[in-house]
Structure formats: structure tokens, C-alpha cells
């Protein structure tokens, strides 16, 4: 029931709020499409079928293929963004880093932080490796081409849109949720914005203490 409430809250905020942006405030979801999407997801959640998560195929910063099976065995904190983001991404990654650094070594071993790029054009593996390891060498990042990114963002209810205007200005819009996945690869909860500072560490401590005994 707790997970169901969290899922419904996430679906509601995705539906009624403007997407968090990096360089632009314009999204491409129409009201009717968003309403239909919410209705479908609400039905799934109401039937206790968590709609967050699912199959994917991406590549990590070491050039290795990763799939949904790569989530098995550890808890994962997942954030979708891009390396040149100047607003949401640095804030979220700093929040994650602060929480991670306050975990004891045994707890850190049970948690993997993953940054997933929504900018296939510019976020090459070397770029992502430099970006993510600047926060912590233990963190990793994953990327894919557009069809692969579309698939995983759809499964995780994450929003992103890439646009160019008449002057070829490159714009990337994206949502800013931090997802916590369990060691079986299943969704546990999510965090967003300023809420993460207040609840992220407390939640991680509570969950990880049961896996380090």
C-alpha cells in the first residue's frame, strides 16, 4: 500500500506539473495524450502492478552492456539527465553525493548510483565517465541511442525532449526524479527536488540497515 501511494503521487505530479528543464521550459506532451497516459498508468497502479521499471539495454562508461538484470543484487539510485545540464542535474547529483558520503562503507557496498543520459548526441562514454566520476569514482553512468533511451524513460515514467530552434540552439528538457530500486530490480520509491535533502539519507539508512546485518 505504501508503494502504491508513492506511485500514484508520482503519476499525479508528472501529469499536472511542468517538466523540470535544463535549457527550456517547453514540453511536447499534449494535454489529451498526458491525460490518457495517466488514466492507463492509474489503472495499472490501482491493480497493484507497479508500472515503474522494465526491460532495457544500455551501455555503461566502461563500454559494457547493461540491462534490467544489471540491477539485481544491489539497491540502485537512478537519475535521468545529461552532462551539460546546468540546473537540475548538478543539484540532484550533489544531493545523492551528500547522502552517499554519509553512509558507512558496508551500506555503500549495497548501493550503486547510476546516472542515465537522455542526450545520446553529446553524451559519449568518455564525456559521461568524466562527468560522473567527478562526483564519486564509485558512481557510474549509462547511455544509449535514442530508441534505447526512449524505451527506458518510458518504462521509468521519466520525461525528456530534445529540441532545436531556428538558430540551431540545442535544448534538452527532462524530469528530475531520483528513483530507488531494490536489489531485485523493483521500484521502491522516488525523490524529487528539495524533498531529497530531507528524506534521501534517512530512507537509505532505513532500507540498507536491513541488508548489512
Image (cartoon, rainbow, N blue to C red):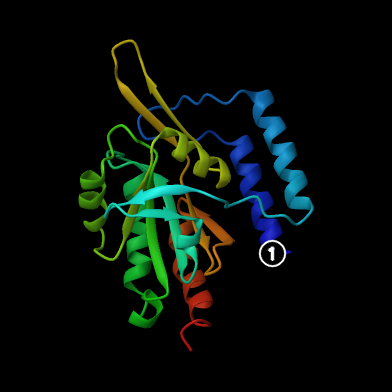
* Quadrant in which residue 87 is drawn: top left
Where is mark 1, residue-wise?
A: 2
Q: Nearer the viewer, residue 128 or 203?
A: 128
Above-or-below relation of 135 to 148: below
Q: Nearer the viewer, residue 169 or 71?
A: 71
The residue lying at 63 percent from left, 36 percent from top is: 15
Above-or-below relation of 135 to 10: below
Q: Position of residue 22 (x, y in %)?
A: 37, 35
Q: Nearer the viewer, residue 87 or 187?
A: 187
Question: How many neighbours does mark 1 have within 10 angstroms: few (below 14), some (14-19), or many (20 or more)?
Answer: few
Q: Position of residue 170 (x, y in %)?
A: 31, 24
Q: Position of residue 77 (x, y in %)?
A: 44, 60
The residue lying at 59 percent from left, 40 percent from top is: 14
The residue lying at 38 percent from left, 41 percent from top is: 144
Q: Position of residue 163 (x, y in %)?
A: 39, 22
Above-or-below relation of 118 to 199: above
Amino acid at each position: 500500500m505504501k508503494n502504491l501511494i508513492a506511485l500514484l503521487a508520482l503519476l499525479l505530479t508528472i501529469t499536472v506539473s511542468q517538466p523540470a528543464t535544463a535549457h527550456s521550459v517547453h514540453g511536447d506532451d499534449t494535454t489529451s495524450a498526458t491525460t490518457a497516459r495517466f488514466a492507463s498508468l492509474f489503472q495499472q497502479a490501482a491493480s497493484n502492478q507497479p508500472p515503474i521499471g522494465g526491460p532495457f539495454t544500455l551501455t555503461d562508461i566502461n563500454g559494457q552492456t547493461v540491462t534490467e538484470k544489471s540491477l539485481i543484487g544491489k539497491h540502485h539510485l537512478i537519475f535521468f539527465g545529461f552532462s551539460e545540464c546546468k540546473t537540475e542535474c548538478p543539484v540532484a547529483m550533489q544531493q545523492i553525493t551528500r547522502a552517499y558520503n554519509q553512509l558507512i562503507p558496508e551500506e555503500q557496498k549495497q548501493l550503486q548510483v547510476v546516472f542515465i543520459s537522455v542526450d545520446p548526441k553529446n553524451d559519449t562514454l568518455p564525456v559521461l565517465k568524466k562527468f560522473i566520476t567527478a562526483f564519486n569514482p564509485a558512481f557510474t553512468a549509462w547511455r544509449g541511442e535514442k530508441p534505447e533511451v526512449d524505451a527506458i524513460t518510458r518504462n521509468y515514467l521519466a520525461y525528456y525532449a530534445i529540441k532545436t530552434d531556428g538558430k540551431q540552439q540545442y535544448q534538452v528538457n527532462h524530469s528530475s526524479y531520483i528513483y530507488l530500486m531494490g536489489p531485485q530490480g523493483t521500484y521502491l520509491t522516488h525523490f524529487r527536488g528539495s524533498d531529497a535533502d530531507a528524506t534521501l539519507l534517512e530512507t537509505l539508512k532505513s532500507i540498507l540497515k536491513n541488508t548489512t546485518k
